[in-house]
Amino acid sequence: MLKQIDLLRHGEPVGGRRYRGQMDDPLSDRGWEEMRTTVQGYDDNWDAIVHSPLSRCADFAGELSGKLGIPKLADERLKEIGFGAWEGQTGDDIRAVDPDALKQFYLDPVNNQPEGAERLRAFYLRVTGAWDDIVAHTEHERILFIVHAGVMRAIVTHVLKAPLLSMYRMQIPSAGMMSIGFSEERPPTLKF
């Protein structure tokens, strides 16, 4: 029976902080170190790894899977949200074009997404569809998801049955990890 899923955000990619969305930047040296540090002490806890196919998640999933001798599975539905015109831009780049764009986005991400971005509801349904499939069909007790901040936000929003507007009210650091526990008595529960 599934007992816990740990959600791990990828570490810093090459190029530092930016709205990279579905750009496939690899991890920087610092990003590798952040992820290796985060997983220390958990090495014997996971039965499997599920990850985004983007290299900033997939590369570390491959290293950890090999080290632990556990299976890994890439799921296309766990890619980060596509940020459209903001892909590859820093916050300062976006503010230079429109000083209020980020503020408007974070206040209402459903109606104030960048031009050409993946619609937030479509992204949420893509990610939660993957989540629901994996939770319903896994034979593992503990799974590590190696994913993106947006994917983690969508999963937490789903687990808490929170409104979609609340999704960007979570800050998740590079290589940040959180857990969701499962039991027969309670619905899925955030664990800190």
Image (spheres, rainbow, N blue to C red):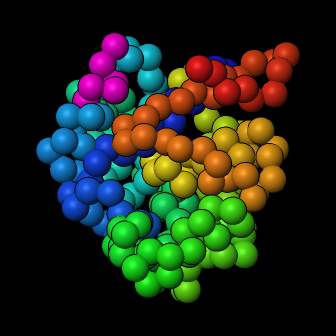
Please give the name of the residue rendered at 40% of the width and 79% of the height, measured from the top-left corner. Answer: 96
Q: Indicate whether 32 appears above or below 99.
A: above
Residue 44 picture location, percent across and down: 37, 14
Magenta highlight range = 36-41
- The image shows residue 25 at horizontal and vertical percentages of 26, 63
Q: Is residue 78 magenta?
A: no
- Judge whether residue 26 can be spotted in this image: no
- Residue found at the far left of this picture: 29
The quarter of the displayed image where residue 187 is located: top right
Q: Is residue 108 shown to the viewer in this render?
A: yes
| Main secondary structure of the magenta stretch | helix
Left or right: 182 with respect to 5?
right
Q: Is residue 43 found left or right of 135 in the rendered image? A: left
Specify whether residue 39 is painted magenta.
yes
Q: Residue at x 61, y 75 (%)?
A: 113
Along the line of sight, which residue is nearer the eye, 157 or 101? 101
User: Which residue is rendered at x = 53% and y = 44% of the image?
Assistant: 171
Q: Is 107 above or below relative to 61?
A: below
Residue lying furthest right in this view? 185
User: In which quadrant is the C terminus drawn?
Assistant: top right
